[in-house]
Image (cartoon, helix red, strand yellow):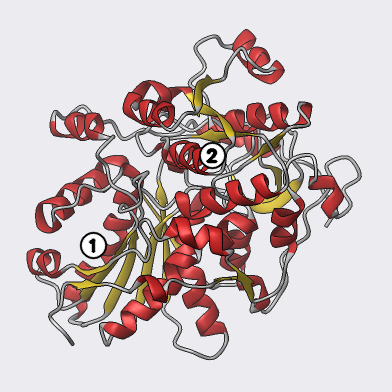
Amino acid sequence: MSTQTKYLLQESQLPKFWYNIQADLPKPMPPVLHPGTLQPIGPDDLAPLFPMSLILQEVSTEREIEIPEPVREVFRLWRPAPLFRAHRLEQVLGTPAKIFYKYEGVSPAGSHKPNSAIPQAFFNAQAGVKRLSTETGAGQWGSSLAMAGQMFGLDVTVYQVRVSYDQKPYRRALMETYGARCIPSPSNETEYGRAVLAQRPDHPGSLGIAISEAVEVAAKNEDTKYALGSVLNHVLLHQTIIGLEAMEQMHMADAWPDVIVGCTGGGSNFAGLAFPFIGHGLRGGAKPRIVAVEPAACPSLTRGKYAYDFGDTAHLTPLTKMHTLGSTFTPPGFHAGGLRYHGMAPLISHCKQLGLLDAVAYTQNQCFEAGVQFARAEGIVPAPEANHAVRGAIEEALRCKREGKAETILFNLSGHGHFDMSAYQAYFAGGLKDEHYDENELAQALSGLPSVPA
């Protein structure tokens, strides 16, 4: 195997199609249900929130969906993204494993999120939409959609989970630099936000609440559509450009992963890397072990129930079957804001039910410990979310060391941590707490799941 460190594709090798795993699954996903009738929804039910082009992507079972040339033109600002061999980390760990990472922090917004923000903005602009409303946790999605809106002439309003709004002022500044309005959620700008604040004025917020506010704004204004940064099928579809590039780069390295690792909150960056490899295995190719790493304080895959639930707290969204902690569950305010969501993407949840992936959970301090070790070896400071993938990859490398196996590990470094240095400062000062969710609150949230006949 080559001792090369960096594997770069040319712009001419930028993928022309996204990969849709639904074409290869042995069993189709459970349908999305209307919360009133409990019947499968149709495209018209989603039309108030999304343009028809994105709705058709959401329900498509075609294996390949073309990436429009105007989208690829913007992608060329940073794509194809590099693949690295982590030689120095391997040496530090003393492992016989070969560790590779796909680095998505090279995008202008610093994470993988523009991979979906750009096409979502493009398809909305094509449909004549003037404004987009959205939510964000840590701010990677909000800043990405703000950038995308600027590129396609759309006004963007972002409802940011309040605890992250306070923790990450520079993410907010980045959104405003790109021209977006950033509002702490819950806010006084929506009926639902006001209702939440009336019950608890100091509410720390959650992605479920922020989604409710953004959906309410889109539903009430004809010139406004809603954009979501994770969870939905079309978002995961857009992110598969990560795995498609990584496949070509692994061939360049004369290697193929035995293990693939990604962090999971809603699931977009994880699916982006893993789905093309899972699909390759389902079509008769090699089948790597797929490991989803989530925060112990918000463990939807390892602790949640696989059931129909709402995607938001106000119950404005359709019902999807997913691993969920309950739509009313409010995760503790740990620093990986992008992973603080009560549910896992239905497609990822379905894949887990089919036995196509494993899931593990780690605490905040375990993940920051791994992130610091990675930064000191490889020079890149990961985002708190990406630290979960780093932790997962290191654990796999140490397992290889114990077992004397020279396996190949590939993980997705989904973004840099340059806006998260206050969290690193807290870690070094010993002030980073391992947050724990309230078992009683979780039980209450799960007891309130919608009743859907089997």
Q: Is residue 111 above or below residue 178?
A: below
Q: Classify the position of the N terminus by image quarter.
A: bottom left
Q: Is residue 134 above or below residue 398?
A: above
Q: Who's the residue at 42% across and 51% down the image? A: 294
For residue 223, side relative to residue 453 (left or right): left
Provide residue 383's location: percent of width, then percent of height. Answer: 30, 44
Q: Is residue 120 above or below residue 137?
A: below
For disc 2, the neighbor class at 10 Å (few under 14, some 14 to 19, many from 20) is many
Which image quarter: residue 421? top left
Q: Who's the residue at 58% across and 55% down the image? A: 235
> What residue would you read off at disc 2?
149
> What residue would you read off at disc 1?
394
For residue 178, side relative to residue 212 (left or right): left
For residue 420, side relative to residue 72 (left or right): left
Q: Foreground: 118 or 331? A: 118
> Disc 1 residue type?
Ile
**In the image, which disc is placed on residue 109?**
none
Q: Who's the residue at 59% across and 43% down the image? A: 228
Provide residue 298's location: percent of width, then percent of height. Answer: 47, 41
Q: Foreground: 62 or 124? A: 124
Q: Who's the residue at 75% across and 46% down the image? A: 319
Mark 2 vs mark 1: give the one in front. Answer: 2
